[in-house]
Image (spheres, rainbow, N blue to C red):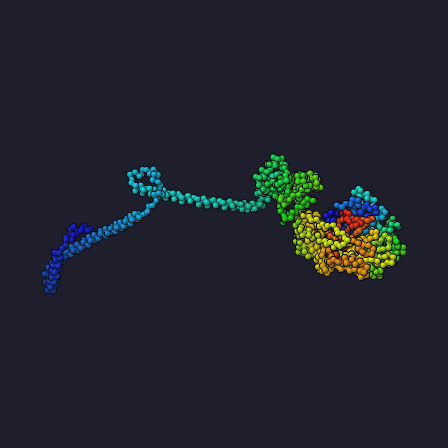
Amino acid sequence: MDSKISNTNIYLCSSFSPDGKHMVAGNHAGWIFVWDVASIDDNKPVQPSYRWKAHEYSVYCIKFVNNKLISGGDPGLKMWDWPTILQAKENGEDTKLVFDEFITDQNTLYETNGIDIDYVNSQLYSACGNKLGYCWDIETGATIKTYEGHHEFLTCIKYNRNYNRVITGSEDSTAKIWDNRTNDLLFTLDCSKGIIGNEKINRKKSWISCMDCDASGNWLICGSGGTSVYTVWDICSPRVVSCFPVKQGPEDVKFINDKILTVGLDSITYTWNFSGEPLGRTVNDMALTSLSSYNEVYTVCGYSNEIILYSPYNIKMGSFTI
Amino acid sequence: RGSDSGGDPDSKKRRIVNQDDTQAIKVLINDIKSNIGEYVAKRSNAEMDSAEDIYKQTLILFVKLKQLNRDIVNQTSDVSLETKHCQERQEDDDLQLQNYLYEKNHYRREIITCQKYETGDIFEDLMPLDEFLVSNQNDIDGLDEHQINIRRLRNELELREEMQKQLKELNEKKEELIDKYSQKMKMINNLKNELKSIDEVSSPLQKLFDVSITKNQETIDTAPYLPQPLYILFTVVTAYIDASGDVNVKIMIEGDIEEGKRCTHELYNNNNQSEMTTENIYECHPLSINLSISQGNSSITLNIYYLISLGIVTLQSDSPIDSLIDLFPNDSGEISPNPASSIIFEDENFTFDINVRGRAYYWLQQLCGLQFLNVNHQHSLMQTDTKIRFSVLLQRIKERMGSIDELNEQIDILKKGKIPAEISTRINIRNFTELNTFKEISHNSASKITLAKEEGELEDGEVGAKDDTPKIKLNPNSRYFEAIFRNRPKDEFRALVEIPPSYPEHPPVFNISTKVSRKTAPKYEIPTILKELANEEAYKFATSGKSELSVEVPNLKYIESELNTNCYSFLGETTSKNEILSYQLRKLKMCLDIHFEVANKGVESGTRTPQGRAIRGRDRRPYFDHKLW
């Protein structure tokens, strides 16, 4: 990548490696970068230790499972071998990395917008641009289930182990809760209005941009673009419990311990408690698209070259850059 | 009365007539009368014989009378002649008398004038008496003072007259000479034009014989006085010109020849090394090379100097924009290529003022035979063993000139609001925006634009972000332009275009921002149900702020990225790289059209790809990639 025009870099997804030693992020041009967290320094941004072009257009979601790195992008859903990547990092070569792909006839041309992983059963859930949600077997790469019913492309998907449910969010401004065993659609949530809606929803400029389930599996938070609101649902009933309005553009949300962290296009990182009270705001100088956390620290990244690492008390510890 | 002989020869013989004669005449007459009477009487009486006698007597009396008469007449005429003569003499005398009187008067007047005449100091003006006496010794002997003075005056007069004559002559000569001289001057002044016209007229002939008369000889004569690097450059270029016959390249030597001789001599004595000091670092050799390269209608002139103190060769070009920057990658000519300078000035990348003597390009040093071991810069040129050939360099320069010409042409068209490029699409992109202005801006204005991002207000409990640094580093050698696109609700999309000096090898870089007018600013309203659930403080914060969004508009970043990275791919095979600017702007307009439509209608936008989708991905990006159009 030409460093001259790297001011147009946009990170779309980020994640810590399971051991917390590495930071991985994917950008709008399809590149995935790897950084050493240990080299974080207050003064100087950390350069990537490795990078490669994973997808043709963009990388939308990225997650680790066992020793693999799964990236969903435009197009394709690929699985990379993590140790090989670390090896390549050591050698510093530009090796062509081998990947496995989760692919069917239907989804070849479509992008994968969100993924989630069932670690116990080793299954992968993906939200696809062809209005379908998929469940894959990680070992074999075969499709186990598809979730059909949205009117527009899916933006995110979440697996809820507690209730064995799958929740999908879509451009059509609804989130649907599916029963994982029977594959039935249980509920359709209109997140822009906070009600359980009908099938036909007036989807005027509102779409689900992000979702997260908390550790216990009882709560679901959805971000609605357009109305710029996060709604927290009690998955069991389901009903809206609280609401978090933001200035603009919800992009990513995470339950971290007993707090909720949200980031968005207004470049503000909000910290909330479960009842909707804002606990703090951190203003950055770039619009944010992704949030990832490891233990107590978290990173935010978005429309710039930098991924900023924050300590639990919102103190900037350093940054990763291209 | 006396008789005067007069002129009559018989006069001596004449008898003097007197009173008696008069009496005699009277008697005669009476006798005649009586005789006549008698005759008549006798005739009447028929006394012929007596009549005859009377007749004869009377005849005799007549004769006597005649004689007497003759005498009288003669005497009268004598006297009258005499009188006449006397009269004549008298007149002559009278005349003479008059003359003498006149003359006397004249002299009297003259005398009075002379007596009145103030001689004054006239004798002072004359040649001094001694001199005169010396020079005219012979003539003067025995003359009195008066005569001497007269002589002196006369002499003086003569001398002066002669001198005046000489003066006149000399003046005339002088006039002549002046005339001659001015004519010659005119001729010489015209000579230059005549020679020029001769040169012009004979130029076809010159071309035929491949000989050019005028300037080359002088240049070649001066060449040996050039300092060594410039000399090498000179030989390389002239060799190229001779070998290739390229008429578009001309080389000349400029500067003071004498100074140059002296300076080169000094350098030679110091073994071509000059001590590098921190003072007077721009001291340059008096001779410089003037290289002009033309292509089509445009040409550039390069002045090449050798900076003695820094030991480098610099180049100054005449075009207002330094068009030879980055001819090879990373070569702006601002850093001194000579590593020695970094030691003296204690600065790793010693930069000097390029406005004094121009820029020091690496390729220029190489052409001049200056090989520097490059310690700090990772420069591809200096590290390879291949020498740059002048023909290759010339090719690059000409390409660069052509690129700049085409670039300026495009800019001229763009300034009028038209985009001279078309991109064909399969999908229907409706026209919402149009190019409103395209103008060049100064670096100052450019830096102000990039700081446009607004920050949110900080409230209690918030931690502010780090200090805002300008997002874009300004390249001092690039040109910056501002393109403003407008659509009907008067939203403004502003693109800051940076055109690097190495256009089009490096494409223009775009930086896009927008100002949304009040009409289209989306209003975010939280539904009533959720409003009740929302924390009041959070709700207030969320809904506060202006309706004009100054936060990031995601699509613009994608458009930027498209324009900056994939630019050459939408050029097509037949279009030259030089037109990249226009194509980028056309693409920008089309992307803005798509963006505007999608921003307002979302998924239901009319602009759909052949797959039927308007937006794609979690980030809801429209199809800015032209491959999908």
The one nearer the camera, A266 or B476, is A266
Count of marks overlaid on the render:
0
Q: Quadrant of residue B519?
A: bottom right
Q: Residue furthest right?
A: A182
Q: Is residue B506 visible?
A: yes
Image side of residue B219 versus residue A203, left or right: left
Q: Residue at x 14, y 56 (%)?
A: B68
The one nearer the camera, A115 or B399, is A115
Q: Position of residue B559 (x, y in %)?
A: 74, 53
Q: Position of residue B290 (x, y in %)?
A: 61, 43
Q: Position of residue B524 (x, y in %)?
A: 77, 59
The one nearer the camera, B477 or A316, is A316
The one nearer the camera, B71 or B627, is B627
Q: Residue at x 31, y 43 (%)?
A: B150
Q: Is residue B624 visible?
A: no
B68 versus B311 height, above or below: below
Q: Quadrant of residue A83?
A: top right
Image side of residue B472 versus residue A104, left or right: left
Q: Residue furthest bottom?
A: B44
Q: Position of residue B148 (x, y in %)?
A: 31, 41
